[in-house]
Amino acid sequence: MADTLFLDDWDALTRERDARFAATLDRVFAYHPFYKDLLTRARLRRRDISGISDLAKLPVTTKKDYLANPGNFVLAWPEAASAEESIIWDVMHTAGMSGVTGTPAPLVSTNYDFFNILALNRNILRLCGASEADSILNLFPLTRHPQGAFARVMNAAAAFNIPVTAAMPGSPNARQPDIGNSLDAVVAIAARSEATILWGVPSYIRKIVARAEEMGVVLAHVRLVFATGEGFAEQAQTEIVERLKRLSANDPRVSVSYGASEMQGGMVECVPGSGYHNPAPDQFCFEAVDPDTHKPVPDGEEGLILLTRFDRRGTVILRYSLGDVGRLTRERCPHCGALTERIVGLPRRMDGFSSRSAGGWSIPRR
Ligand SMILES: [Zn+2]
């Protein structure tokens, strides 16, 4: 699997990353309102940044910086710009910041970015062990603002060319109340869809599976449960697995992801305990730095996790603090062979932005 998913050595990956980062930087220095200003103030010129290895020269971007004006993080393209790079495909919103700002912050994806998002979500499915024989039941509800969780599950199925059924739990809209479905209706949809993958928020998946057992509904096809958006204790995972077995599922498995709206996807484990893999090392890189000094910490030591989206044309964020601390490794995964960053163990929140809602993605807390 890893042979086709990721490049086989760090030198090759670094060359690929540097090429993509260079193209992004050219545009950042020309069109990015926030970083143009920040880099000028930091006295950094384009030629001072030759590649990913120079990332540490850039100051860390905080959520506060981002929330102050999310529009300042979108490349301001000139009218004559190439279409694929500049056409806005969609605008998703962060979930977790709503408690702070009052409104979820927009993340703009251009046509160029959307293809990256398709590739990213396809990689997630591959890493989690999905196959062409699988089909997905999307258990995320619609939200007031468009958010990645619902939309990207649909996109993941598209990128992987497998069927998806959106169960549409809840009543998202008073004007069209019959669009959403009750718990019992969702259980019925789960049964008739014969989906092999349940994808949603742990607490809701638990409800569905428990209700299916009460109703005597068989969920024999389920083999994978993809959970994201909130904590999922080991015991609760075991409970779901045992219940699914009683509902005739054969050897079902739970996969928890460490996700973020800022990724429009999540870091996933290939097998439980293997660490959360960066699913698109050709689009994102991760660093761990000291939370106070922002100096890089050695691999394996706990540090503030930074995300750089070095291959984006809409919202571009560089060295962006996800607000979590965790231990990063760049060693080849001993299980799947992937060469990418992995976060070993569960990252933990360290900022005040802890009340992420289920519509986006968030760190799994136990
Ligand atoms: Zn792996």
Image (cartoon, rainbow, N blue to C red):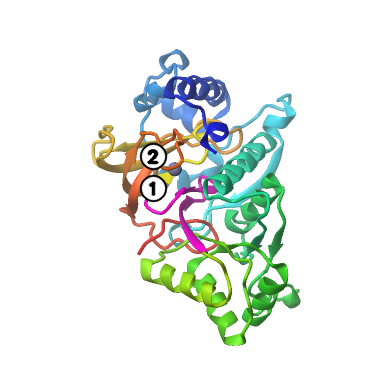
The residue type indicated by label 2 comes to Pro
At label 1, the amino acid type is Ser
Q: Secondary structure at mark 2?
A: loop
Residue at 39 percent across and 57 percent down: it is 353
Asked if residue 170 is among those painted magenta in the image, a careful observer would answer no
Mark closer to the observer (2, 1) = 2
Q: Residue at x 44, y 49 (%)?
A: 269
Reply above or below: 177 against 112.
below
Marks 2 and 1, Cα distance to the nearest angstrom? 8 Å
Residue 180 in view here: no
Packing grade of label 1 (10 A; few <14, some 14-19, many >=20) is: some
Q: Position of residue 289 (x, y in %)?
A: 29, 37
Looking at the image, residue 8 sits to the left or right of residue 183; the answer is left
Q: Quadrant of the C terminus?
A: bottom left
Numbered circle sitting on residue 334:
2
Give the image location of residue 13, x and y in percent. Answer: 48, 25
Range covered by the magenta-colored residues: 252-275
Query: Do callouts 2 and 1 mark residues in contact (Cβ within 8 Å)?
Result: yes
Would the CB of label 1 be found within 8 Å of ligand 1?
A: yes
Mark 2, ligand 1, within 8 Å: the answer is: yes
Hey, which quadrant is residue 178 in on the image?
bottom right
Task: Please identify the quarter of the rendering in which residue 151 is found.
Answer: bottom right
Residue behind mark 1: 274
Residue 268 lies in the magenta stretch: yes
**Residue 222 % position (x, y):** 60, 66
- For the residue pair 283 and 329, the one nearer the viewer reads as 329
Could you tell me which residue is drawn at 55 percent across and 50 percent down?
A: 129
Tag count = 2
- Mark 2: few, some, or many residues within 10 Å (few <14, many ≥20)? few
